[in-house]
Amino acid sequence: MNQKLKLLEQEAKDAIRGVSTIAKLREVNSLYLGSKSPLREIMKTIKDLTNEEKKEVGMEINRFKAMITEEVEIKEKQIQEDLIQRRLETEEIDVTLSGTSFPKGSIHPLTAITEEIEDIFIGMGYKIAEGPEIELDTYNFEMLNLPQGHPAREMHDSFYINPNVLLRTHTSPVQVRTMLEEKGKFLKIICPGRVYRRDNDDATHSHQFMQIEGLVIGTVVSMSDLKGTLSELAKKMFGENREIRFRPSFFPFTEPSVEVDVTCFKCNGKGCSLCKNTGWIEILGAGMVHPNVLKMAGYDPDIYQGFAFGMGIERVAMLRYEIDDIRVFYTNDVRFLKQF
Ligand code: PHE
């Protein structure tokens, strides 16, 4: 019996060593260890042996199994290593081949302008304040000196969700919220964000657009501080030689109120199509914070003063890049966006 096993073992080892694929190896494995292997035949005859012999043959059989299993494992590893080796030898990577290029996006012009203006004001010590686009009538109008029925509400006609809640028509309510939160502290903030007005959508109007408004509150804040600040903004945005001028205007939340123009950066003030031959381009509205607004937000107007201003980002972007249709900002045509 042992003799038989010895022969079988030699035969199996030779067979294992002779194979060169994993599939063949599996075949050989089941040929010598599987249910139809000669080993099974040997095992069937064990029952006729003496106890002593049974023990001895049993041990031999286990040794045989372990030996074959080990040989198979060694062979398998070897085959796999050979495979890898062969791939390494035959496959080459040509590092000189030109690669696949991935399409690269760019920053949307409105985002770029917003960030540029934010940077300018952060440089002057301002903080950025943000608020909800769905706003209470109280913050959007009431506390900005625009009571129910005030005619100036017409200019801001909006999308109401219910009589007390609307899509904000400007980012000024963020200023109100900040004043209420900071409870009488000095403030220097800008409020960027999306605003909504019921408007016709045409080349220069959109029912949704973006604004940046600013607010400064202290005890000694004057109109000349406002002019200095906006002059700095104009120079940084449109070039060192820019000058600004104030024209009297009206906003319910500021008194006095001004419309701010900058000298045309295309013709340097001489007159051209961009400035409609006036030499000036209107960029924003501003003024000194109305005493009523201060009072309603808990700031004593006999102690505190402030200035505020607000501009449309689209308008600045349209001037800067000479874009003549506001709608191109929102349709996201890549032929337009790719230019930035
Ligand atoms: N809130 C005004 C608007 O949206 C802009 C503005 C802000 C004007 C602050 C003056 C002062 O029309």
Image (spheres, helix red, strand yellow):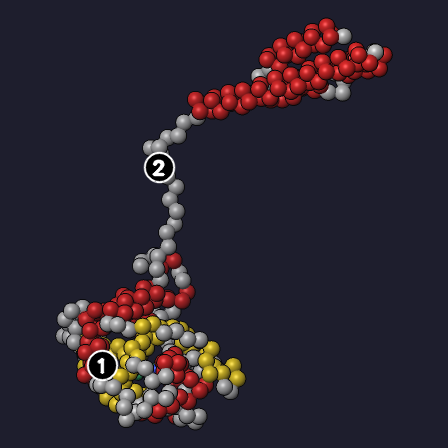
Say whether residue 19 is visible: yes
Q: Residue 69, located in which quarter of the rendered image? A: top right
Q: Which residue is mark 2?
A: 98
Q: Look at 62% across and 10% down and name the residue there.
A: 14
Residue 99, image x, y percentages: 37, 39
Q: Look at 29% across and 77% down and name the residue there.
A: 188
Residue 326, image x, y percentages: 35, 70
Residue 221, image x, y percentages: 23, 84
Q: Which residue is mark 1?
A: 226
Q: Look at 44% across and 24% down and name the residue there.
A: 88
Q: Tell me the mark number nearer the camera, choosing from 1 and 2.
A: 1
Left or right, 295 with reference to 132: left
Say whether residue 200 is visible: no
Bin the neighbour count of mark 2 within 10 Å (Cα to Cα): few under 14, some 14-19, many 20 and up: few
Q: Look at 68% across and 16% down and name the residue there.
A: 63
Bin the neighbour count of mark 1 within 10 Å (Cα to Cα): few under 14, some 14-19, many 20 and up: many
Secondary structure of the residue carrying tag 2 is loop
Q: Quadrant of ligand 1?
A: bottom left
